[in-house]
């Protein structure tokens, strides 16, 4: 398998006997080179001794020599810099575009490495490398989780920049769109993001001192005022009338179809109506949400900002039809922490990267360390195989590990997979 050959070359897991090309020249690998994930040769700037002569250049890897022609490399000048063709099976000679031959090394994967890799691929238990985890040192685990945490923050930073692009580079708007998405808490996340992108933020800004008008714009653009419930009350009719006026005034785009919202198998406190009422109250209460969170010095200050309420109507309702016992619909502690993990932390990190302010990036990581680990099936999986998970930093790293490596069976790029493959 070509991926396994990449792995063997990258980590220099070579047979004990001397290496030689198919023409009999000795091969000494001084530096395997830098792995290339884009177009072009597989490894850049390798340093080799071929027949006693030092060469510096690129290395290409294929399962069979004939793959060189199958991929068209013989007519691609980007591959003229290749100094060694590493193959699992040398079934033909290969040349550069000018016809000069390229040395080939037929490389075999050590039997134990192949066996362990097959075990990882076949194992139906997640994570498949569970057997090696108890033997790993704390340093190995900590270093890999730290790298995964940064990898996840970098990935979320790209998502922030994409939303920023869609919001005409307005940080406040991109922040609210992300905040809204995370108020969907999974089931309604896509609907909340689509709704937030339809909100006319400049129009909302002009009316944010009036909570009823903010609610009218929010519920109206969500499509939740389109169909009158059987027992509509004055509050509903007032919102609908207000929205029709604002819709005409600002020539608003069509509301989100009401069928996008999901309520089945959901706790009433997570109904989109309740979450939207909290967001409306938040938008009405606080000016410059993005700036307030970016300037918050500590985690307690952030939590204080997230102590949300609703207008009085929602203390007795879950939807426009469903009544609830009278009580404040606040954002619970765990919900607050999820908003911090998935909205505040990524924006701190992304904004810090954007402004080249390392202090903001560091604060994002400090916030993750200060929060407890998330409780979801991914985290419980790792906890069940003996990997201790205590902070949100740990849980975010393991979510990244599961989604980017375990689900894709990309064990060859995982440090835990590496430890599994190298065991005796």
Image (spheres, rainbow, N blue to C red):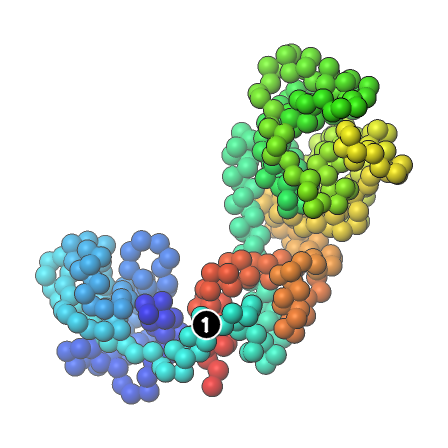
- Would you say 59 lies left or right of 159 here? left
Q: Write the residue at 11% across / 58% down.
A: 98
Q: Nearer the viewer, residue 411 or 85?
A: 411
Percent x, y of residue 229: 74, 24
Asked if residue 78 shows in the view, the reply is: yes
User: Could you tell whether 367 is left or right of 412 in the image?
Assistant: right
Residue at the spot 46% in from the left edge and 76% down from the top edge: 119
What residue appears at the point 45 percent right and 72 percent down from the top-left corner?
122
Q: Residue 292: x and y, percent? A: 73, 38
Question: Looking at the image, is 330 positioned above or below residue 76?
Answer: above
Question: Considering only vertical position in the picture, is 170 above or below 344?
Answer: above
Q: Quadrant of residue 191?
A: top right
Residue holding disc 1? 122
Mark 1 Cα shell of 10 Å, populated few (<14), some (14-19), many (≥20):
few
Quadrant (top left, top right, bottom left, bottom right) of the N terminus: bottom left
Task: Specify the farthest residue to the front.
Answer: 230
* Residue 54 visible from this viewpoint: no
* Number of marks present in the image shown: 1
**Residue at horizontal 61%, vertical 32%?**
259
- SS for callout 1: helix
Which residue is at the front of the view, 145 or 216?
216
Viewer-side residue, 373 vs 118: 118
In the figure, is residue 28 to the left or right of 181?
left
Return the residue found at the far left.
Answer: 99
Residue 423, horizontal then vertical, whole percent:
48, 82
Q: Is residue 155 left or right of residue 185?
A: left
Residue 391 sits above or below residue 246 on the image: below
Can you give x and y, in whole percent of width and height, for residue 307 in the image? 81, 41
The extreme right residue here reads: 326
């Amino acid at each position: 398998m070509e991926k396994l050959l990449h792995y063997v070359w990258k980590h220099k897991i070579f047979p004990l006997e001397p290496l030689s090309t198919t023409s009999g020249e000795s091969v000494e690998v001084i530096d395997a080179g830098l792995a290339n994930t884009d177009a072009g040769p597989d490894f850049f700037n390798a340093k080799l001794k071929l027949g006693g002569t030092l060469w510096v250049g690129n290395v290409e890897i294929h399962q069979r020599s004939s793959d060189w022609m199958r991929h068209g490399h013989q007519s691609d000048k980007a591959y003229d810099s290749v100094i060694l063709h590493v193959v699992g099976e040398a079934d033909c000679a290969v040349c550069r575009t000018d016809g000069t031959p390229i040395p080939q090394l037929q490389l075999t994967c050590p039997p134990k490495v192949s066996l362990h890799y097959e075990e990882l691929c076949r194992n139906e238990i997640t994570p498949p490398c569970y057997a090696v985890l108890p033997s790993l040192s704390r340093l190995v685990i900590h270093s890999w989780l730290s790298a995964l945490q940064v990898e996840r923050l970098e990935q979320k930073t790209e998502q922030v920049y994409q939303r920023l692009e869609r919001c005409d580079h307005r940080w406040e708007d991109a922040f609210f769109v992300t905040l809204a998405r995370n108020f969907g808490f999974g089931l309604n996340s896509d609907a909340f993001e689509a709704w937030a992108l339809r909100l006319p933020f400049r129009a909302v800004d002009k009316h944010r001192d009036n909570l009823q008008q903010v609610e009218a714009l929010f519920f109206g653009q969500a499509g939740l005022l389109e169909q009158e419930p059987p027992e509509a009350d004055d509050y509903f009719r007032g919102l609908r009338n207000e929205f029709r006026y604002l819709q005409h005034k600002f020539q608003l785009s069509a509301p989100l179809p009401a069928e996008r919202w999901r309520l089945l198998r959901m706790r009433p406190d997570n109904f989109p109506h309740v979450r939207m009422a909290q967001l409306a109250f938040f938008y009405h209460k606080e000016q410059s949400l993005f700036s307030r969170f970016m300037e918050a010095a500590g985690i307690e200050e952030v939590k204080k900002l997230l102590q949300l309420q609703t207008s009085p109507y929602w203390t007795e309702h879950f939807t426009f039809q469903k009544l609830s016992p009278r009580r404040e619909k606040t954002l619970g502690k765990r919900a607050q922490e999820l908003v911090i993990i998935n909205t505040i932390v990524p924006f701190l990190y992304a904004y810090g990267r954007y402004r080249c302010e390392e202090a903001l990036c560091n604060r994002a990581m400090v916030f993750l360390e200060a929060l407890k680990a998330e409780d979801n099936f991914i985290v419980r999986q790792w906890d069940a195989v003996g990997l201790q998970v205590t902070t949100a930093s740990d849980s975010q790293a393991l979510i990244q590990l599961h989604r980017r490596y375990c689900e894709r069976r990309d064990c060859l790029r995982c440090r835990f997979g590496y430890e599994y493959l190298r065991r005796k």
